[in-house]
Image (cartoon, rainbow, N blue to C red):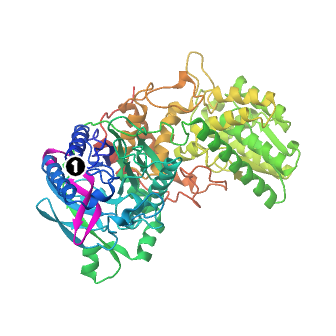
């Protein structure tokens, strides 16, 4: 495949354009449209949307009924059609057109020297400053009709879907301004019929706060319809006899803003973005109620309905060949380095507030439901156990119970460092929980001796058995302590560890009575801890420890340190959590194949100086990854993810936290434990360049 091509990776480049209008001068307006069309062509744009009545101007009042203007509009349209022969974009242009006994407010869809179809405005506002029924007829009853235009007979109606035969998933529907403001817009029905890109040509004079209303409607439409929604409003040059215009343009996808232009511009402006057609498709196949809605409303393709004899609301499909460019066009959209962690400070603060309280309230309810047992927790001084401990402390506060009902244990083994041990001690002490230390090394030595392990004979054999003896003993102690003291074991392992299988199964850190961290990815936990430290939940002594924990390198501390050798580091084995969480999100939330994940990761991570970073992210940790590194760690992820499903199939209870998903077999993720990664690895091998291990 053409790995570096956005089109080959399931994207389509779209533009919403606003241009200076010369009132009642279609020839001048056509020139403005074509200038922007050529600029869009040069940028590889597939679809360019212009404002309502862009060829005549929106506020020309009774001039809409003048033959001179209407004839000039048709001449200008003919000029645009002819000039489009050598241009890539499908052009959607607003124009008043005569049809039968009336004038219609239309969107004309043009491509490669042809008019593909005409979408009339269905709903005409005749209230407040609007008087459209004085000049136009509604188009809602024009389904299935045709019109003569630019020497062609072309389909006309609100029932048209324009489908690119060479760009999988690109199906466009067009509506005009007010159509978006009614309870059931034409675009909603079109989306149910299969439209993935919804375009709105708008006049929409500006008043105070109307821009926010438009954003609300566009965002909502894109979210509810699982679609891209393109909006272009009239701007500079429109008549200001009684109104004013701001030229707002924006592109939303599934509720997310991809691009917008400045308002009240001097000159033409365009918003350009690459819409993810795979995302639209994935969202629709995952949310089964989307198609249930289509079935209930009996919406479908006209040709299929005629063939089957079914009745209902049908749409006609107009096919065209785009001829998308090949090669690297870049990627015109923001890609989050950390899809679980917002870049915006306010959004991140809100996410942390919600995540933390989801965990706290989940634990509260579990304790309340099972008779208010004590909480037994192992604390290592690492990120996960630190966060689980402060969640437990907050839950006890809210339940009105003493924090001494939390029994926290540090269980040092052969490689426990003084630093993390001190973190655990200081944190537990500052929180006022009951804190004890149990040295597991004597028991571990005995168990290793019983196993006839080489370590028991003095050999430096630090294998998986050596590691899991320690991990298993810690969990064993915690469960027996819970039995002995009337408590439950609080799990601390996070979502990222579960995805990668970085946990010891059964009698190990995979198991607990309740796990508050199982829905939280590793890349979010550090921000949660930092947010708690900054929020005033606990005292300054506690907050100081929390900030130190966040800065410490992630390590399991199971293998003794050898002088001159780098200490054991988790990410050296499982990969950088930054990359692995990136992959995790796009696997479980988006269902993307490896080649697309690699493409997105390359755009997100190849340049540390480009793009946004989450607030307070340390500059010294702002790294970059090249494509061979991305490919290598993606292969590690796939192999570990498939090999460790059996651990996820036996997870303890715990709350879902992130909309990105969870690993619970009772919730977001159900997968056979014996599934093979063969197809995913083949896709990686065949479609992602840069094979070989990372340096």
Against 435, is 78 above or below?
below
429 and 506: which is toward the camera: 429
At a point 60% along the width and 43% down the height, the residue shown is 503
Against 618, is 114 above or below?
below
**Can see residue 326?**
no
In the picture, which quadrant includes the C terminus?
Answer: top left
- In the displayed structure image, the side of residue 450 where residue 612 appears, left or right: left
At a point 24% along the width and 41% down the height, the residue shown is 32
Task: Look at the image and say whether residue 107 sits in the magenta stretch.
Answer: yes
Q: Position of residue 478 (x, y in %)?
A: 76, 45
- Classify residue 2 by image quadrant: top left
Range of residues picked out in magenta:
84-110
127 and 682: which is toward the camera: 127
- In the displayed structure image, the side of residue 304 where residue 196 appears, left or right: right
Q: Position of residue 30 (x, y in %)?
A: 21, 46
Q: Position of residue 417 (x, y in %)?
A: 69, 25
- Classify residue 290 by image quadrant: bottom left
Task: Give the residue number, with chain letter if any, for mark 1.
Answer: 26
Q: Residues within 10 Å of mark 1 (few under 14, many from 20)?
A: many
183 and 436: which is toward the camera: 183
Q: Main secondary structure of the magenta part?
A: strand
Against 110, is 397 above or below?
above
């Amino acid at each position: 495949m053409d790995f570096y091509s956005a089109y080959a990776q399931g994207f389509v480049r779209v533009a919403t354009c606003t241009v200076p209008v010369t009132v009642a001068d279609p020839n001048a307006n056509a020139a403005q449209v074509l200038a922007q069309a050529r600029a869009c062509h040069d940028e590889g744009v597939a679809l360019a949307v212009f404002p309502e009545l862009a060829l005549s101007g929106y506020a020309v009042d009774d001039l809409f009924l003048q033959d001179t203007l209407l004839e000039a509009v048709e001449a200008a349209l003919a000029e645009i059609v002819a000039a489009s022969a050598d241009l890539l974009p499908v052009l959607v242009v607003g124009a008043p057109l005569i049809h039968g006994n009336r004038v219609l407010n239309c969107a004309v869809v043009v491509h490669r020297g042809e008019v593909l179809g005409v979408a009339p405005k269905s709903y005409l506002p005749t209230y407040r400053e609007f008087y459209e029924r004085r000049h136009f007829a509604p188009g809602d009853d024009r389904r299935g009709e045709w019109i003569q235009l630019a020497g062609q007979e072309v389909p006309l109606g609100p029932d048209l879907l324009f489908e690119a035969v060479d760009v999988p998933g690109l199906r466009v529907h067009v509506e005009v301004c007010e159509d978006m403001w009614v309870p059931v817009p034409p675009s909603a029905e079109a989306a149910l019929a299969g439209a993935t890109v919804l375009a709105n040509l708008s006049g929409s004079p500006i008043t105070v706060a109307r821009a926010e209303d438009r954003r609300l409607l566009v965002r909502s439409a894109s979210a509810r319809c699982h679609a891209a929604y393109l909006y272009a409003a009239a701007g500079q040059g429109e008549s200001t006899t009684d109104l004013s215009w701001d030229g707002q343009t924006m592109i939303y996808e599934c509720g997310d803003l991809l691009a917008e232009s400045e308002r009240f511009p001097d000159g033409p402006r365009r918003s350009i973005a690459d819409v993810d057609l795979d995302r639209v498709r994935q969202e629709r196949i995952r949310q089964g109620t989307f198609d249930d809605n289509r079935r209930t409303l009996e919406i479908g393709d006209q040709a299929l309905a005629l063939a089957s004899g079914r009745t209902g609301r049908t749409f006609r499909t107009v096919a065209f060949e785009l001829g998308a460019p090949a090669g690297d066009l870049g990627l015109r959209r923001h890609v989050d380095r950390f899809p679980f962690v917002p870049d915006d400070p306010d959004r991140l603060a809100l996410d942390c507030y919600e995540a933390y309280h989801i965990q706290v309230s989940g634990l509260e309810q579990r304790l309340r439901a099972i008779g208010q047992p004590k909480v037994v927790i192992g604390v290592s001084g690492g990120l996960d156990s630190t966060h689980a401990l402060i969640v437990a402390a907050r839950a006890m506060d809210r339940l009105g119970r003493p924090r001494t009902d939390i029994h926290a244990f540090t269980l040092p083994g052969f490689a426990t460092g003084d630093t993390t041990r001190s973190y655990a001690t200081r944190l537990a002490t500052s929180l006022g929980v009951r804190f004890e230390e149990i040295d597991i090394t004597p028991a571990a030595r005995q168990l290793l001796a019983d196993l006839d392990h080489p370590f028991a004979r003095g050999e430096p054999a630090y294998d998986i058995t050596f590691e899991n003896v320690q991990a298993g003993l810690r969990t064993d102690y915690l469960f027996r302590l819970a039995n002995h003291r009337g408590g439950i074991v609080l799990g601390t392992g996070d979502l990222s560890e579960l995805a990668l299988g970085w946990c010891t199964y059964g009698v190990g850190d995979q198991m607990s009575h309740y796990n508050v961290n199982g829905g939280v990815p590793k890349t979010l936990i550090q921000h949660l801890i930092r947010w708690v430290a900054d929020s005033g939940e606990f005292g300054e002594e506690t907050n100081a420890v929390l900030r130190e924990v966040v800065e410490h390198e992630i390590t399991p501390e199971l293998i003794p340190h050898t002088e001159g050798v780098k200490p054991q580091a988790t990410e050296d084995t499982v990969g950088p959590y930054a990359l692995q969480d990136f992959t995790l999100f796009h696997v479980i939330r988006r269902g993307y194949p490896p080649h697309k994940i690699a493409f997105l990761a390359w755009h997100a991570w190849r340049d540390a100086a480009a793009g946004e970073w989450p607030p307070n992210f340390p500059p010294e940790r702002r790294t970059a990854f090249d494509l061979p590194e991305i490919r290598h760690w993606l292969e590690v992820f796939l192999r570990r993810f498939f090999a460790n499903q059996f651990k996820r199939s036996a997870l303890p209870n715990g709350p879902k936290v992130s909309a990105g998903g969870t690993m619970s077999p009772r919730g977001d993720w159900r997968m056979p434990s014996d599934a093979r990664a063969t197809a995913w690895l083949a896709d990686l091998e065949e479609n992602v360049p840069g094979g070989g291990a990372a340096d």
